[in-house]
Image (spheres, grey):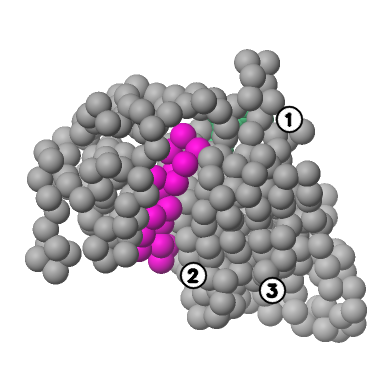
């Protein structure tokens, strides 16, 4: 289906009163049409900044310092260059936490959808536009299409509103869908419905979805691949199955250990906090909190290690567990 989004060696910095802070550091990611890529990590790890760069929505003091963002083969972000307007809304759709950020409370759903289609697909006739709108609403799982289209947002439940927000994002049939904590404000049942919906919209389509969440278990349910972010870097990248069942980075293992009832055992919070990253930082960012850290981890570059099976981890000890024992081959761990 082809690559729809690439982040190449993307570094994003913020100018702050305390000097330059590196928010996203040399991130490489690709998204294929038809796949869901999870971007997960603790609050402050740089997930939102990463995806906002794709949408051209960085804060005024934040900018791309090096690298590039490429959508459908076209560079849309690079240092001193931003060309996002052509793709945003038309080729890149977005859904954020809480539908209220994308819905206009004063407009009926039908009018909101019409405005999006009119803006991004001006050549469609009124009839084609309305056919597309009715179609997208039924794809969202609504059976009473007209009733939903004639509603104001406040007349719908939270889960329905979030599905309308998704409809607004996909009505133009974008190749890239960015979702940022789009299920966080929902109860568990509604969350599952929205996750299923994203799965069915993406699978087998030409659209790739980036699913940003702090919830590793939720990501493992919906995503094909998962990228784990820590202090601005991708520290592990692999298939969802491998990242959850054979985590290669101590941070990923710590995230899993912090999940209630993951293995029925004790929940272990990750002590300490992620460091503030400046341009002269060296060594592994997780080393101060890592149970496996040794002297080598505190200086120099940390290698991006390919592990058998094709996944990657940014760790000197990616081939060992926290006790320093070599991992068994995947085939013997089932
Ligand atoms: N405009 C800004 N100026 C300075 N620092 C910023 C700015 N915006 C974000 N940051 C910092 O960048 C880091 C990454 O923030 P970001 O929101 O991308 O993380 P996140 O992983 O998405 O977290 P969350 O889940 O809480 O949204 C944080 O330390 C944050 O404080």
Q: Secondary structure at mark 2?
A: loop
Q: Position of residue 247 (x, y in %)?
A: 26, 51
Crowdedness near tag 2: few (<14), some (14–19) or many (≥20) residues, C-alpha within 10 Å: many
Quarter of the image holding residue 108? bottom right
12, above or below 51, in the image: above
Q: Is mark 1 within 8 Å of ligand 1?
A: yes
Residue underneath mark 1: 61
Residue underneath mark 3: 173
Q: Of residues 217 and 272, which is closer to you in this image? A: 272
* Image disc number at residue 212: none
Q: How far apart in space, not on screen, are marks 3 and 2 (Cα)?
A: 15 Å
Range shown magenta: 220-241
Say left or right for 327 vs 239: left
**Total marks in image:** 3
Q: Are marks 3 and 2 in contact (CB under 8 Å)?
A: no
Residue underneath mark 2: 35
Residue at (80, 56) in percent of width and height = 83
């Amino acid at each position: 289906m082809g690559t729809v989004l690439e982040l190449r060696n993307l570094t994003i910095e913020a100018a702050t009163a305390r000097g330059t802070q590196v928010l996203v550091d040399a991130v490489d990611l690709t998204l294929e049409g038809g796949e869901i890529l999870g971007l997960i990590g603790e609050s402050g790890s740089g997930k939102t900044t990463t995806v906002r760069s794709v949408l051209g929505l960085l804060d005024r003091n934040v900018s791309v310092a090096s690298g590039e963002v490429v959508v459908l083969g076209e560079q849309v972000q690079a240092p001193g260059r931003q060309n996002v307007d052509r793709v945003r809304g038309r080729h890149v759709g977005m859904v954020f936490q809480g539908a209220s950020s994308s819905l206009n409370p004063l407009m009926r759903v039908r009018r909101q959808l019409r405005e999006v289609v009119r803006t991004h697909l001006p050549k469609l006739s009124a009839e084609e536009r309305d056919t597309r709108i009715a179609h997208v609403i039924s794809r969202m799982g609504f059976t009473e299409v007209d009733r939903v289209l004639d509603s104001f947002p406040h007349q719908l439940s939270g889960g329905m509103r979030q599905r309308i927000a998704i409809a607004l994002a996909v009505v133009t049939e974008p190749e890239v869908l960015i979702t940022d904590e789009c299920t966080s404000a929902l109860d568990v049942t509604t969350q599952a419905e929205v996750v299923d919906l994203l799965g069915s919209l993406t699978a087998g389509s030409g659209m790739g979805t980036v699913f940003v969440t702090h919830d590793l278990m939720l990501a493992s349910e919906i995503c094909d691949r998962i990228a784990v972010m820590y202090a601005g870097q991708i520290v592990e990248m692999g298939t969802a199955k491998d990242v959850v069942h054979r985590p290669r980075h101590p941070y990923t293992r710590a995230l899993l250990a912090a999940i209630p009832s993951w293995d029925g055992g004790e929940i272990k919070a990750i002590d300490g906090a992620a460091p503030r990253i400046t341009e002269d930082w060296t060594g592994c960012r997780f080393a101060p909190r890592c149970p496996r850290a040794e002297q080598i981890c505190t200086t120099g570059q940390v290698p991006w290690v390919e592990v058998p099976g094709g996944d990657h981890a940014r760790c000197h000890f990616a081939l060992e567990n926290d006790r320093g024992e070599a991992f068994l081959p995947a085939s013997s761990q089932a």
